[in-house]
Image (cartoon, coloured by chain):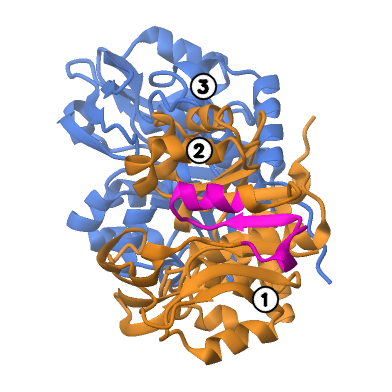
Chain colours: A blue, B orange
């Protein structure tokens, strides 16, 4: 069972109330790959980097079963660079710098060896890029999950709506769900978005957890209350990687199993925020994940007798 | 099994994005009584009202098994009046008017007939009033639950800390937990507050649910995602009434049963916000409550196989 993940591989500079790093590996596809590789191999990466992206990082991904044939290396340009600063509440941040660099020319090509993948994670990219990847797939995957952001709703809404028609699961945060639907109530927003294409909608609420909507059903997964959220960068992509990784591992895309997948994604994300960048999710073990999943069970488990 | 509830009985004027009422019955003890009376009788009310408080409301409470011997009626003064306006997100509000009226002279007296109550809900009042009620109780109740707010942390912190030494459960919202502890992380805040007296701490996060802390354990109860939050006034008190009502009904104050009690409180609160003031919680039935509890089970229930 393979998973294709399309997204950025980048450098980030991050400042949080707890410290700062000037240059650390980041990018949505990096986080998705590290998270998903805990559950499934191969993870088939589609991305673009410059001459400066570290070979050690590529090697570290390969060791975990991540295939990099779909990662274009541009010899005379720099990798995508993002810099941001988090506010004290860690739920909001200011983008300080966005240097597209290689990303400006990103025209992803799906390698032949990736054809037949049953699970696809479309990271947050321009809708036309997401569409291009879908149209290159010779067989319709079992499940296409799509991430996006408010930026594309502002400047490329028509394209975004086209992609929505072709995907199974949409991942957005609460503000984006409101913007896309024009509804303040997340329940109403979900109902509208579920008419736009996707059969499943996940609304991420950061430290307040995540909601999964499907038909008339709703499921809520909390975030683990943590002593310290050290750096939230990549938490959403790590969540997505854990989510699709669990689905691919179990080959079960029922609503019931998506609930479990969301808990798995939340558990992975809870590790991600403990250190800068992907540092923490690179070092966790199967035992760490199982221990944390057990904490999630404790966190929400209750008994009730309905008469 | 009886429950004493101490708090306000009042009039509110409320404006929300969905409408406004100029005068509706409110007050913490009113909401607690309506909520708790679904589970336990008698609810023994301690409060103070003016000449203008409606006899029909008193009758309606009595019919539900609420005793009013501890409610002082001041013949020449008006009832406490609060007026507020909610912002669009419904999680924040501005207080427009606070007319203390009778509340300025509130010196609660615990009637002899209330002595021996095993459960006590101390509504949000001046710490000295809360202390005075505790000191009048001839036998230590099985469980004392206390609500408070940032206002008392600002102007009566020493008194507040004295009350904390004498209660079992503290109910506050996230901002208040942060203020009381001086910690931003709610996990750290909880650890500090649990050294101040209470053995259990509930942190209410409005539409984002509630956390229960006890020793090294934490439990999370979501709020039900609703199509519309019509009026949040009284939701916290309704939550408290459902919580203590369930505990009193089951006579079980273990951490496990408190989890269930928090779900019950959340279910009651989810009704409260559907109409103005206490209108909705006055009309719900046992069947309504059970149906909603089943929704909570669906909302958070997931299967996971830990290897």
Residue B298 on image: x %, y %: 68, 62
Q: Which residue is mark 2?
A: A239
Structural crowding at the residue carrying mark 2, measured as other residues with C-alpha within 10 Å and reported as few (<14), some (14–19) or many (≥20): many
Of residues A120 and B153, the one nearer the viewer is B153
Q: Which residue is mark 1?
A: B67
Structural distance between the alpha carbons of marks 2 and 3: 11 Å
Image quadrant in which you'd find residue B77: bottom left
Above or below, comparing residue B134 to residue B199 in the picture: below
Of residues B280 and A268, the one nearer the viewer is B280
Residue B42's disc is none
Structural distance between the alpha carbons of marks 1 and 3: 57 Å
Q: Nearer the viewer, mark 2 or mark 1?
A: 1
Looking at the image, can residue A226 be seen? no
Q: Across the whole image, how many numbered discs are drawn on residues?
A: 3
Tags 2 and 3 on a common chain: yes
Image quadrant in which you'd find residue A288: top right
On the picture, is A165 further left or further right than B215? left
Q: For the magenta stretch, what is the residue range?
A: B110-134
- Residue shown at 59% from the left, 53% from the top: B133
Structural distance between the alpha carbons of marks 2 and 1: 51 Å
Residue B305 on image: x %, y %: 78, 38
Looking at the image, can residue B122 be seen? yes
Q: Is residue B171 magenta?
A: no
The reply to whether dot 2 and dot 3 touch (C-beta < 8 Å) is no
Structural crowding at the residue carrying mark 1, measured as other residues with C-alpha within 10 Å and reported as few (<14), some (14–19) or many (≥20): many
Q: Is residue B112 magenta?
A: yes
* Mark 2 element type: helix
Of residues B251 and A199, the one nearer the viewer is B251
Q: Which residue is mark 3?
A: A281
Quarter holding the C terminus of chain B? top right
* Mark 1 element type: strand
- Residue shown at 26% from the left, 52% from the top: A150
């Amino acid at each position: 069972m393979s998973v294709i993940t399309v997204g950025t591989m980048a450098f980030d500079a991050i400042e949080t109330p707890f410290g700062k790093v000037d240059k650390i590996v980041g990018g949505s596809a990096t986080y998705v790959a590290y998270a998903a590789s805990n559950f499934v191999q191969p993870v088939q990466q589609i991305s673009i980097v410059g001459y400066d992206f570290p070979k050690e990082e590529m090697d570290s991904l390969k060791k975990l079963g991540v295939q990099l044939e779909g990662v274009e290396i541009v010899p005379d340009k720099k990798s995508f660079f993002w810099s941001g600063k988090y506010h004290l509440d860690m739920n909001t941040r200011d983008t300080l710098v966005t240097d597209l660099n290689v990303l400006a020319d990103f025209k992803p090509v799906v390698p032949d060896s990736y054809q037949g993948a049953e699970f696809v994670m479309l990271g947050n990219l321009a809708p036309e890029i997401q569409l291009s990847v879908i149209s290159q797939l010779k067989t319709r995957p079992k499940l296409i999950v799509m991430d996006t952001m408010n930026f594309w709703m502002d400047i490329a809404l028509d394209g975004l709506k086209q992609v929505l028609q072709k995907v199974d699961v949409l991942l957005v945060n609460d503000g984006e769900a409101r913007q896309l639907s024009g509804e303040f109530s997340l329940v109403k927003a979900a109902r509208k978005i579920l008419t736009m294409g996707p059969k499943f909608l996940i609304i991420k609420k950061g430290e307040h957890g995540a909601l999964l909507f499907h038909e008339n059903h709703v499921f809520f997964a909390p975030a683990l209350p943590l002593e310290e959220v050290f750096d939230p960068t990549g938490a959403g992509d790590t969540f997505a990687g854990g989510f699709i990784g669990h689905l691919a591992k179990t080959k079960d895309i029922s609503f019931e199993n998506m609930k479990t997948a969301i808990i798995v994604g939340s558990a992975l994300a809870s590790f991600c925020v403990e250190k800068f960048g992907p540092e923490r999710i690179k070092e966790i073990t199967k035992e760490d994940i199982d221990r944390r999943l057990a904490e999630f069970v404790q966190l929400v488990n209750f008994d009730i007798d309905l008469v």
